[in-house]
Image (spheres, helix red, strand yellow):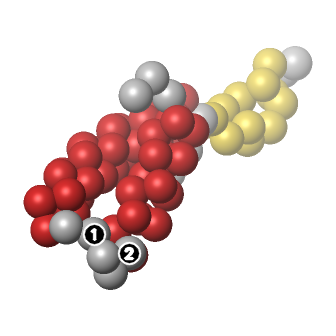
Amino acid sequence: MENFEEALKRLEEIARKLEDENIALDDAINLYEEGMKLVDFCSKKLQEAKNRVKLITGVKNGKIESEDFE
């Protein structure tokens, strides 16, 4: 996966397939493994985004001040 949106879309597809009662056990296990890798990927992307987000706290002496997002 190259981006968060693609990974999330694939996770949704996997969830729908896993909800199908007629899925073979091996297929379900493979989809589950793929899903877990995508969850890890998405979590890392969200953490990266969180680390980049800044909260603007105000302007002091004509300069915008910010702090890390918590």
Residue 47 location, quadrant: top left
**Closest to the observer: 44 or 19?**
19
Please name the amino acid that badge 1 sits on.
Ile
Tag count: 2
Q: How far across and how far down the image is residue 11, in percent?
A: 43, 52
Q: How far across and how far down the image is residue 36, in percent?
A: 24, 52
Q: Decide: marks 2, 1 in contact (CB < 8 A)?
A: yes
Left/right placement of residue 25 relative to residue 2 reads: left
Left/right placement of residue 67 relative to residue 15 reads: right
Q: How far across and how far down the image is residue 8, in percent?
A: 50, 47
Determine which of the numbered discs, if any, sits on residue 4 in the image. Answer: none
Determine which of the numbered discs, if any, sits on residue 23 in the image. Answer: 1
For the point 19% across and 67% down, the residue is 24
For the point 33% across and 44% down, the residue is 38
For the point 45% across and 40% down, the residue is 7
Vertical position of residue 26 compared to residue 48: above or below: below
**Closest to the observer: 12 or 45?**
12
Q: Quadrant of the N terminus?
A: top left
Please say whether residue 68 is visible from this viewpoint. no
> What is the C-alpha distance between the residues marked 2 and 1?
6 Å
Q: How far across and how far down the image is residue 10, in percent?
A: 46, 46
Residue carrying label 2: 20
The kind of secondary structure element at disc 2 is: loop
